[in-house]
Amino acid sequence: MDNLKIEIRSPHLEGAEVSWFAPICNGDDRYLGERSMNHKSTFENTSQIVLTADKNGFRNILCPSSYQVGQDTLPFVSAVAPMTEQINLLAAIRCGEIHPPMLARTLATIDHILKGRFTINIISSPLPGEEMSSEDRYQRSREVIEILKQIWTQDDIDYKGKFYNLKLSSSPGKPYQNGGPLLYFGGYSPAAVDLCAEHCDVYLMWPETEGNLRKLMENMSAKAASYGRKIDFGLRVHVVVRETEEEARAYADSIVSKLEVEQGKEIRERALDAKSYGVSRQAEMREIAEDDGYIEPHMWTGIGRGRSGCGAALVGNPDQIVEKLNRYMDMGIRAFIFSGYPHKEECERFAKLVLPRLKTFSMPKVQGKVTSEEPMSPLGAGIRI
């Protein structure tokens, strides 16, 4: 590992893609564990969060996927798409839910509605009620991606795999973007890392210590190099920013102040990926953190007591948050997906206190380009001004 280094596909770009999170799977509250009708996952509420992020200059927004709670991802994205003006939409796609050719047609429809402002987060979690090995789930995802890429780049689908055997025209699934939307991906198992290295564009990590993040990036860089590729890196993390550090820490503590232990456990375990390796790494972080929940300066793990998946938050004043983000960018991280409780109010606060101090862009395409005639920035094809 000592000889490994981090190689990214966009080394010439300064700054990052700064994104927000649309809580379409519930979980948008002032206090974790205390449900409020004001923050219920309705289209009215969550579409306002998307529009707030759009209005305030965020470059992308993650629309997640879950079976138990909230709204379905693709209908939500399709409905909100015409309401947006500048922001990209990052839709989570659980591979295996939709027959790949039909999935391609659905994605192409949304891509055309958005005129190319569409990105995809590949998910390999189990389908509801399904029991399948991790290796098989990632193999199914690999086949879905490979079929999508045939549809995006070839006249016909000619595919034979373990899960799919297809031979038909690809014309119904042609997207707005030549070569198809960018693929974002998160996963920690060897099968996950291998899939991302071979096929995806942005590797999303959950918060960990800077040393652990660097190791993940080095490992992914080495694996991508074995396929003759380079990957960009992203970080999905919560954030609590206030004018002073004392205010930020007090607000962070208040978020979980009404959370019962058993209630937090129920929230964490309801997700389909609750037993994944990535979730276990978040739990390990909480276990080795200090008594106040901080595992390193301004990285607070307490929020993971009341939610599944991403289980830590950046906490501090604007100077401290900007300094931390600059450290991440110096490591090679080029994409951030932030969230806060409640999401609309914290989106506005982050946009006021932090976002104007960050240089931002939309993640660039490497192969193919947006077919739109919109002006592109001089930084590279596919980056909107």
Image: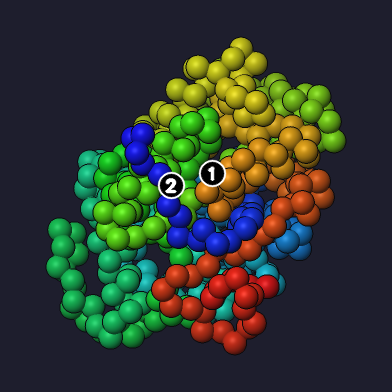
User: Could you say where residue 92 lies in the image, as x and y percent from the top left?
Assistant: 47, 56
The C terminus: image quadrant? bottom right
Position of residue 300 in the picture relative to residue 368 (left or right): right
The N terminus: image quadrant? top left
Q: Is residue 138 visible?
A: yes
Which residue is identified by label 1? 331
> For residue 4, which numbered disc appears in the image?
none
Q: Nearer the viewer, residue 123 or 192?
A: 192
> Residue at the spot x=53%, y=33% of the render?
210
> Residue at the spot x=56%, y=84% of the render?
372
Amino acid type, mark 1: Met
Q: Disc count in the image?
A: 2
Amino acid type, mark 2: Ile
User: Could you say where residue 53 lies in the image, as x and y percent from the top left?
Assistant: 71, 57
Q: Residues within 10 Å of mark 2 (few under 14, many from 20)?
A: some
Q: Residues within 10 Å of mark 1 (few under 14, many from 20)?
A: some
173 over 69 or under it: above or below: below
> Residue at the spot x=61%, y=12% of the render?
291
Q: Is the Cβ of the residue at disc 1 closer than 8 Å to that at disc 2?
A: yes
Which residue is identified by label 2? 6
User: Could you say where residue 86 lies in the image, as x and y percent from the top left?
Assistant: 68, 70
282 over 45 or under it: above or below: above
Quarter location, residue 99: bottom left
Q: Is residue 37 visible?
A: no
Q: Nearer the viewer, residue 104 or 265?
A: 104
